[in-house]
Amino acid sequence: MKRHISRTLCLMAAAGAGAGAVAEPMGCLIEPDRVAEVGSASVGVIEHMGVERGDMVTSGQILARLSSGVERASMAVAETRATADAEVKAAAAAADLAKSKYERARDLVKENFISTQALEQAQAEWRVADERARQAREARDVAQREWQLSAAQLGQRLIRAPFDGIIVERYHSQGERIEREAVVKVAKIDPLRIEAIVPASQFGSIKPGQLAQVTPQLQQFGVLRATVTLVDRVIDAASNSFRVRLTLPNPDHTVPSGLRCSVDFGGNSAASASAAQPGTPARPAGKPASAAPSSWQMDTPMRSSAAEEPRGGVVQAVFHPAAAPAVRPVPVPAPRQTPGRMVSGRVVVEPPEAAPAAR
């Protein structure tokens, strides 16, 4: 009989604990939207370092400059060649003169003042002069392309920011030689990216464009609103979960990246349930919602709707979620009764024949 009562109490306590459990918001991590370790496309010595860790940078801003004396001189020579037009003008003038000679020779041939051979010679000279003018223009185009090449080579000596962000790390200083390693690390923190691991049971209930409530680990930031931008279409079989990506606007750069957080997609936590009931106070940011005490967690036992007068020896069970169930006898003088039965939270036990009444 005692073994039967203990088994019954354990089952009742487990059922009460399961009924009082409430799903909590899922854990997540706030990360930068983009992270890049910026290096140089060429080998050289750092001539100037223009940023420090923590500096805000914009896209295209010069972060560092390598020594580039040779490249600057080569670019100056290419620029001079590209902008020089004396040879082109001289060739064009010679072509115009040869053309005029040919036109005069053609008129003279009509009047029989010169021979046809002289006309053919004037025509050939005009064609040669015209080709030389075209050759001079092509040479000028090649010089301009060489100028662009020199400018590109000089640009490789400059290290620029790939996007707007903040300098996270600076790996080298002025005077150091670099080859293929990164010089600085840049992170984009507006907007922020949030990665959450969601159980597979919620697959299909979260859609891109859906709003969610994000609570950072630091309470001073309160509850933030993020937008779902990506939902994985593949479920990880090992963890039985899938990933969800959210975007959190951070125009003032007040929320730092790297914070742990909790995300509520709606209907997953006690906060959503309490928000649906009018007059329910909202819980403070950063504190998880606590489960409401069930009937098995109260100090007073549950009573059955059918009122029966307790008779005989009565054992009253008190259930606590954090402690083992305690059983204390309550002496009630009563005559002998039928075999033991359970009525809600009370268990009526028939005392043995020879045992005295419980006290």
Image (cartoon, rainbow, N blue to C red):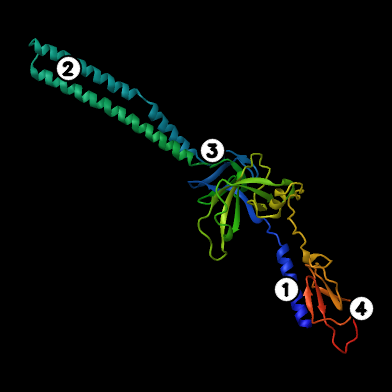
Mark with earlier residue (1, 2): 1
**Disc 1 residue type?**
Leu
Circle 4 sits in a helix, a strand or a loop, which is it? loop
Closer to the camera, 217 or 187?
A: 217
Residue type marked 4: Pro
Please say if the residues under marks 4 and 3 sit with CB atoms less than 8 Å apart. Answer: no
> Is 176 on the left or on the right of 312, as rendered?
left
Q: In this view, does 57 lie above or below 234?
A: above
Q: Residue at x 37, y 26 (%)?
A: 84
Find residue 269 and report its horizontal and vertical position in percent. Answer: 68, 55
* Cα distance between the residues tagged 4 and 2: 143 Å
Above or below, 60 against 328 in this view is: above
Residue type of the residue flagged with mark 3: Gly
The residue carrying mark 2 is: 102
- Determine which of the numbered discs, if any, sits on residue 333 in the image: 4
133 left or right of 123 in image = right
How far apart, in angstroms, are the residues tagged by discs 1 and 2?
117 Å
Residue hosting label 3: 60
User: Which picture quadrant has residue 289?
Assistant: bottom right
Circle 1/circle 2 CB separation < 8 Å: no
The earlier-in-sequence mark between 1 and 3 is 1
Q: How far apart are marks 4 and 1 (CA)?
A: 29 Å
Label 2 SS: helix
Residue 170 visible within the image: no
Determine whether 218 is above or below 91 in the image.
below
Q: According to the image, label 1 marks what residue?
A: 11
Query: Which one is in front in this view, the residue at disc 1 or the one at disc 3?
Result: 1
**Dot 3: what SS?**
loop
